[in-house]
Structures are given as C-alpha cells and as structure tokens.
C-alpha cells in the first residue's frame, strides 16, 4: 500500500475513532464491557467484608481463576465482546447509512477498500481499548480480594502474568474476529438482529459441527487460546458441558493463525461488497 | 483528455422502479442545469456521475475517467448532494479540513484550502461552530464549501440554491459563474426556472427518467416545432399591422397585447417570419422591437413537460 493510502487509512481512523468512542448510540457497549468488572468488584467487596466479620470462605486464587475463566468464556467472550463488536462494527457502515453521511467518504479520492480498512482498524482500536481495559479491570478486581503476598506469588511464580497476557490477547483477538464478522454483516444486512442471531447460534453450535465447519468460527480459535480450561463437572447440565468442552483444541500459534486467516478472508469478501456499495438512503 | 461528461446509453433501475433510461449525453464545460419535476431523474443522474449509484446499463465518463477510478476522479469532481446530513460532532471547519486530509494534502495545505473554501461561501465567522447548530442556508453553504475545497474542475450541485437568502443566492450564482469562466463544468439541478434561465449555458430537461431535450435553451426551443413560436412586436399601429399578418401562411394567431402597444404573434416558421418582418420594417410601419417571448426555460419546460412538471 502506498503512502497516500496509509495517510487515508489514518485519516479515516481519526474521523471514526471519535465517533466510535463518543457515539450516544454506543453507550450500552460501555455498560456491557463494565458489567463483569462490577460483578467481580462486588464479589471482592463482599469477600473482604466477610473476612472483616471473621466469616472467611477461603476461596483460593486457583478457584477464583476457574470462576474467572467461566465468566470470561461464557459471558465476556460469547456475549459482552460479541454484542459489543456487533454494536461497534455494524455501525461503521450501517450507522453512517442511517445518519446519511457515508457519501462524504465515497466522494473523496480514496479506494473503497482503503475506507473499509480504515473503518475496520478504527473499530478494532475502539473495541480493543474498551474491552481490554475491562479485562484488566476484571482481573484487578478478582485479585484485589487477596493479600499482596498471594498476588505476588500468583503473578510471578504461578504463571499469573502469562495468564493475564493471554486473557488480554484473547480479548483483542475476539475483537478482531467478531469485528470482521460484524463489519461484513453491516454491509449485508439492514437489521442487526438477523446476523446477530445467526452468528450467535453458529458460535454456540460450534462443538457439534463437523470438524471442517468448526474452523469457520471465531469461538473455536478463542477457546483454544484461553489460558485456563474450565473443568467439565459430571453434574454439569449437558448443554453447558457441550459449550465448555473443547474436543479439538489447536495449538496456540495455529489458533492465532487460523483466526487471522478467517478474519482476513471475511475482510476480503467485505472489500468485494464495498466496491459495489450504493448510496440509497431512502431505502434505509 | 476529453473535456466532456459523457453518458453512453445509461439506464438505472431501482429494482422494478425506473431511475433514468437510455440517457445519452455529452456535456461540455460551462453551467449546465438539470431541469425536471420531482422524480424525473435529476438526482439519479448526479449520483450516477459520482458513482454513489451504479448504472444498470451503459457507461459514464467524466473528463475521460470512469466512476471505478475514484483516486483520480474525485481529484477533479466535487459534489454537493441534496442529503442534508453531516458527520456528527464536527464544526464547519473540522468537517472540511478532516475530509481534505483524505485527499493526501498535508495539514498546512488542508488548513489553507479549508479556510479558502469557507471564505468563498462567506462562513468564516460560523466556521468553528458545530454544523449541527447551523441554519438550513448555512448547511447548504458548508456543503458547497466542501465540494469546492479541493478546487475541482467538475462541480455537481443538487439544488444548490435551496434555503439561501437572496443576497447569498446572488453571491453563489456569481461563484458558479466564476467556476464556469475558468473552463470548469458546473452541473446543477434547480426547480427555480427563472434562475436556471439566468445561470445556464445549457439545460437538460428531464421527465419520468428520460432526457427530453438538451442544449442551449434557444436551440431547444427552435426544435419544438409543434408549438408555434410566440413573438412580441412593439409598434405604433398594431391593428394595421395585424391585418397584414393574417395574410402570412405561417402565422397561426395574432393577438393585441394587453397594453395595446404591440402584437403577440404565433408563427410556425419563425425564420420566414423574421425575414418578412425585415421587409415590413422598410415599409415604414413604425416597428419598435421584435422579440420572441417563449424561448426561455419556463416556456420550453411548459411545452415539453407540461402541467405535470409545473406542479
């Protein structure tokens, strides 16, 4: 890509970042991202209060890491980041169609593919910042209930730092993967409910899909990258057990490569679509 | 490189709905007005020119470039559309400046071009205010500033005079003239026919998705042969002159003007009529002036598009 195109990408990012971070219609994304922080904070406050009252429940850091892994996989990845990315990335094109302001971009000497890359990167930056900060705050809230010696031991002698780095990495990769999916969906569908429902079902059905179809799924790669596996309890409901199980885990580097490839393929398909995009606000 | 805007057999359908059909145009530089009733295809034609929509059939070339080449096309094309909406949260200056950066201009150049465009539309004082707080006329002007900021050679303007007060209207028309004077294309649509008449070098009359006439307004009028040309003759003895006109084969109607100081004559052959007027002038009938009265856009529009278009 030549220098002008990079300048254009930066120009689009500059315009989009402000819109994405401060959009009134995106306020709920912050609530979604901060919900688990509130949950963990509340749990920590209760734990500390109980300890002060002498009613210790002795939750170990190991147990907490399993609880965190469960909430991260079930709520945070599958719902918070999923719907957050839906809100951010579907709005990049669809939102501007509704605001009737997309044509200003299309009237500049910029290839539409460059516009798409700029918008995608702007969405990725916004989503990654919002959800990574939330991940970091969640982990801080979880650890806050323990004393400094336990935290220090966990961070430096029990792979705690690498776990934190993995969770942050998975968060960014989730934004990257779901971002590409919902950017494409934003150009194909007017109503976000339809693609959201389809992708949600597809992602949930991942464990029962044939091996080849599993790979066309964001959660398939993300599950393999999560640093803590959730143990399948024999008494667990079968549907939950199915969601937890990772029958065909892939190596970390393969999971990252696979997710990057999947996202790239979706973006290439989006580029083909954006080239034919027409401005017809009256039908929006 | 061609200096024309060329539509080659262009059709656009929105599903089953006709946008424009079989449009063939070759538009030279100067001010060209698109005239026609609502839904006649004016905006569709403009959106096709700028690639915002794609033709179902046919091809479009702007100064030799196609709409599939935005990197070159939009260096020479500026479009002020009818969409009265803006990216949220930007001031007038930020709106123009931010989009100029996408042209590859450095910050200093973008700043200079933005202020120059803002000055040309007279919005300097309001430039730092949010566009959301602008009046309709100001929004119209900031859109115009955005369209001209990169100094395009083809300026496409959809209803550019809507919402402007008379003074700004006159200044804006002068701006269009200065662009046209520099050899640029100014293509505009308007409902105000008398303004179109004053501004335009050529007109494109549209109705129901078809181009019904194009070119210089007088030549378009001359081609409308089923409507006799109306000519106003100012003279001292109109009744006497009227009697002479009844002898002419091509004269289909002669009426005394309401001020009784002239005649309104309808002729099917204006060329021959003017020739016979030359003879008459030599006979001393006291002719003061002879001028056509229905070769303006209003009349041509009325003849070609009719009552339906006037509504």
Image (cartoon, coloured by chain):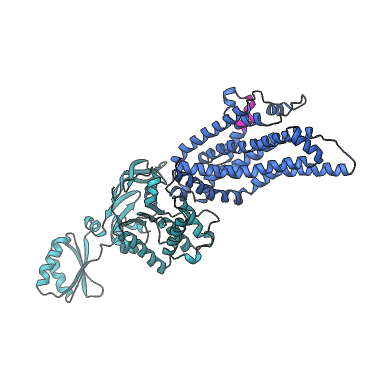
Chain colours: A blue, B cyan
Q: Position of residue B200 (x, y in %)?
A: 31, 60
Q: Residue at x 73, y 35 (%)?
A: A160
Of all residues, the one furthest to the front in this rendering is A156
Residue drawn at x 57%, y 25% as measured from the top left: A213
Residue B83, visible in the rendered structure = yes
| Quadrant assignment, res B185 | bottom left
Residue B148 falls left or right of residue B182: right
Q: Give the main secondary structure, helix, strand or loop, of the magenta stretch.
A: helix
Does B3 sit left or right of A51 as displayed?
Answer: left
Identify the residue at horizontal 35%, vertical 48% (top origin): B209
Query: Taking A98 as reference, is A52 left or right?
Result: right
Image coordinates for residue B262, horizontal then vertical, percent = 21, 73
> Looking at the picture, does residue B281 appear above or below residue A208?
below
Residue B250 in view? no
Image: A179 above or below B297? above
> What stretch of residues is rendered in magenta?
A201-210
Rendering coords of residue B11 (x, y %): 35, 43
> Looking at this rendering, what residue extends furthest in the right direction?
A54
Seen in the picture, residue B254 relative to A58 is either above or below; the reply is: below
Quadrant location, the C terminus of chain B? bottom left
Magenta stretch: residue B95 in it?
no
């Amino acid at each position: 890509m030549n220098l002008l195109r990079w300048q254009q990408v930066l120009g689009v990012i500059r315009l989009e970042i402000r819109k994405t971070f401060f959009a009134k219609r995106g306020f709920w994304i912050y609530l979604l991202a901060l919900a688990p922080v509130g949950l963990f904070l509340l749990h920590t406050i209760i734990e500390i209060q109980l300890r002060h009252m002498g009613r210790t429940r002795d939750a170990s850091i190991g147990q907490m890491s399993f609880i965190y892994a469960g909430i991260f996989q079930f709520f945070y990845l599958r719902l918070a980041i999923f719907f957050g990315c839906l809100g951010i990335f579907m709005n990049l094109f669809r939102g501007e169609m509704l605001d009737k302001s997309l044509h200003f971009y299309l009237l500049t000497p910029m290839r539409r593919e460059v516009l798409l890359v700029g918008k995608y990167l702007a969405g990725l930056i916004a989503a990654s910042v919002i959800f990574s900060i939330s991940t970091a705050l969640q982990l801080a809230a979880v650890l806050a209930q323990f004393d400094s010696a336990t935290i220090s031991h966990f961070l430096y002698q029990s792979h705690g730092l690498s776990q934190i780095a993995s969770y942050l990495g998975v968060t960014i990769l989730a934004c990257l993967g779901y971002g590409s999916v919902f950017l494409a969906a934003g150009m194909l569908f007017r109503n976000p409910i339809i693609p959201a429902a389809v992708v949600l079902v597809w992602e949930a059905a991942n464990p029962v899909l044939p091996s080849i179809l599993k790979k066309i799924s964001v959660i398939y790669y993300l599950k393999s990258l999560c640093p803590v596996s959730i143990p399948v309890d024999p008494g667990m409901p079968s549907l939950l057990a199915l969601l937890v199980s990772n029958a065909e885990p892939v190596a970390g580097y393969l999971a990252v490569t696979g997710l990057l490839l999947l996202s790239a393929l979706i973006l290439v398909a989006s580029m083909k679509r954006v080239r034919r995009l027409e401005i017809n606000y009256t039908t929006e | 490189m061609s200096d024309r805007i060329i539509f080659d057999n262009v059709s656009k359908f929105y599903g089953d709905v006709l946008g424009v059909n079989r449009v063939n145009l070759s538009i030279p530089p100067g001010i060209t007005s698109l005239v026609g009733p609502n839904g006649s295809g004016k905006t569709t034609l403009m959106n096709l020119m700028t690639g915002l929509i794609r033709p179902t059939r046919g091809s479009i070339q702007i100064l030799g470039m196609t709409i599939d080449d935005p990197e070159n096309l939009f260096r020479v094309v500026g479009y002020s559309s009818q969409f009265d909406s803006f990216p949220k949260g930007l001031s007038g200056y930020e709106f123009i400046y931010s989009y100029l950066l996408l042209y590859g201009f450095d910050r200093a150049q973008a700043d200079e071009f933005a202020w120059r465009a803002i000055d040309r539309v007279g919005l300097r004082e309001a430039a730092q205010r949010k566009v959301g707080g602008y009046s309709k006329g100001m929004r119209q002007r900031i859109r115009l500033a955005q369209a001209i900021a990169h100094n395009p050679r083809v300026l496409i303007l959809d209803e550019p005079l809507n919402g402007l007060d008379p003074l700004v209207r006159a200044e804006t028309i002068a701006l269009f003239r200065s662009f046209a004077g520099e050899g640029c294309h100014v293509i505009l649509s308007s409902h105000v026919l008398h303004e179109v008449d004053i501004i335009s070098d050529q007109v494109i009359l549209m109705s129901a998705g078809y181009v019904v006439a194009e070119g210089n307004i007088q030549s378009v009028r001359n081609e409308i042969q089923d409507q006799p040309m109306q000519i106003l003759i100012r003279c001292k003895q109109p009744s006497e002159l009227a009697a002479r006109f009844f002898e002419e084969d091509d004269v289909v109607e002669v009426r005394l003007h309401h001020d009784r100081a002239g005649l309104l004559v309808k002729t099917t052959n204006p060329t021959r009529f003017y020739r016979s007027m030359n003879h008459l002038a030599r006979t001393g009938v006291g002719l003061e002036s002879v001028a056509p009265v229905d070769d303006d856009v209003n009349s041509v529009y009325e003849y070609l598009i009719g009552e339906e278009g006037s509504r």
